[in-house]
């Protein structure tokens, strides 16, 4: 058992299974038709996995000529497996500590130096695009927090889906290679 810091999941097992019906209009219509006749598909297996993400607490000071400096605080995110960076555009639920099976946790593939480098490259472009500063702004990485996002992996006879416990997005598991690989390993 491993203790991890995770965010509160916004959906439970049953809600995750229901989200798999919305992956396409055809699938949604087919599942509705099946449920009307009382023979909707039941998943063969539902497994929870935890995906690593770094939250970058960011402060940017943008120099302005007449109105004084503008200070912006926001959250950036760095994917713990691929190091892709971006703005966190969802409200984050409370963080919790949970003891979970070791096999359900994906360990980060990126080190702290790479997290910082990816964040720095991303924040420079983001601030220039969003705020259009007249001169070079100052960037500060106030803190970095490793948080695990819960995913539900829902396996049906014909397909397997990864359902994000934060955004509720349901996608075929093959679109998230790290989760796909971990799921195959423990299956």
Image (cartoon, rainbow, N blue to C red):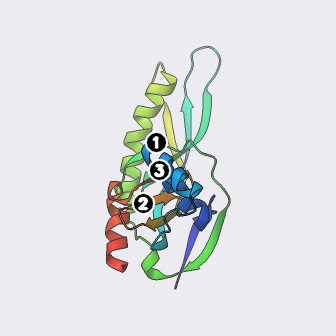
Quadrant where the C terminus is found in the figure: bottom left
- 65 w.r.t. 126: above or below: above
**Residue 139 placement (x, y as % from top left):** 49, 39
Q: How many marks?
A: 3
Category of crowding for the residue at label 2, using alpha-carbon neighbours closer than 10 angstroms: few (below 14), some (14–19), many (at least 20): many
Depth check, mark 3 against mark 2: the one in front is 3
Residue at screen point 48% across, 69% down: 43
Find the residue positioned furthest to the bottom: 1
**Residue 20 placement (x, y as % from top left):** 49, 56
- Mark 2: secondary structure: strand
What residue did someone put label 1 on? 25
Point out the tag, 3 or 1, that comes first from the N-terminus.
Answer: 1
In the image, which disc is placed on residue 136?
none
What residue did someone put label 2 on? 161
Residue at screen point 63% across, 52% down: 92
Category of crowding for the residue at label 3, using alpha-carbon neighbours closer than 10 angstroms: few (below 14), some (14–19), many (at least 20): few
The image quarter in which residue 82 lies: bottom left
Q: 180 or 23, which is in the foreground?
A: 23
Point out the tag, 3 or 2, that comes first from the N-terminus.
Answer: 3
Q: 133 or 130, which is in the foreground?
A: 130
Q: Is residue 124 visible?
A: yes
Residue at screen point 48% across, 31% down: 127
Residue at screen point 38% across, 65% down: 179
What residue did someone put label 3 on? 30
**Residue 96 placement (x, y as % from top left):** 65, 68
- Mark 3: secondary structure: helix
Gap between marks 2 and 1 measured at Cα: 16 Å
């Amino acid at each position: 058992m491993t203790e991890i810091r995770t965010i509160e999941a916004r959906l439970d097992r049953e809600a995750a299974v229901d989200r798999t019906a919305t992956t396409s209009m055809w699938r949604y219509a087919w599942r509705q038709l099946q449920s009307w006749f009382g023979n909707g598909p039941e998943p063969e297996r539902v497994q929870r996995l935890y995906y690593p993400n770094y939250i970058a607490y960011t402060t940017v000071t943008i120099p302005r000529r007449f109105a004084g400096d503008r200070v912006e605080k926001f959250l950036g995110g760095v994917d713990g497996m691929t190091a892709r960076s971006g703005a966190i555009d969802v409200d984050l639920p409370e963080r919790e500590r949970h003891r979970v099976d070791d096999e359900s946790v994906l360990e980060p593939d990126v080190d702290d130096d790479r997290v910082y480098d990816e964040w720095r490259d991303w924040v420079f472009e983001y601030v220039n695009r969003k705020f259009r500063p007249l001169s070079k702004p100052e960037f500060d990485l106030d803190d970095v927090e490793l948080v695990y996002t819960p995913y539900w992996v829902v396996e049906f006879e014909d397909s397997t889906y990864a359902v994000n416990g934060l955004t509720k997005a349901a996608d075929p598991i093959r679109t998230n290679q790290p989760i796909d690989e971990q799921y195959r390993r423990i299956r």
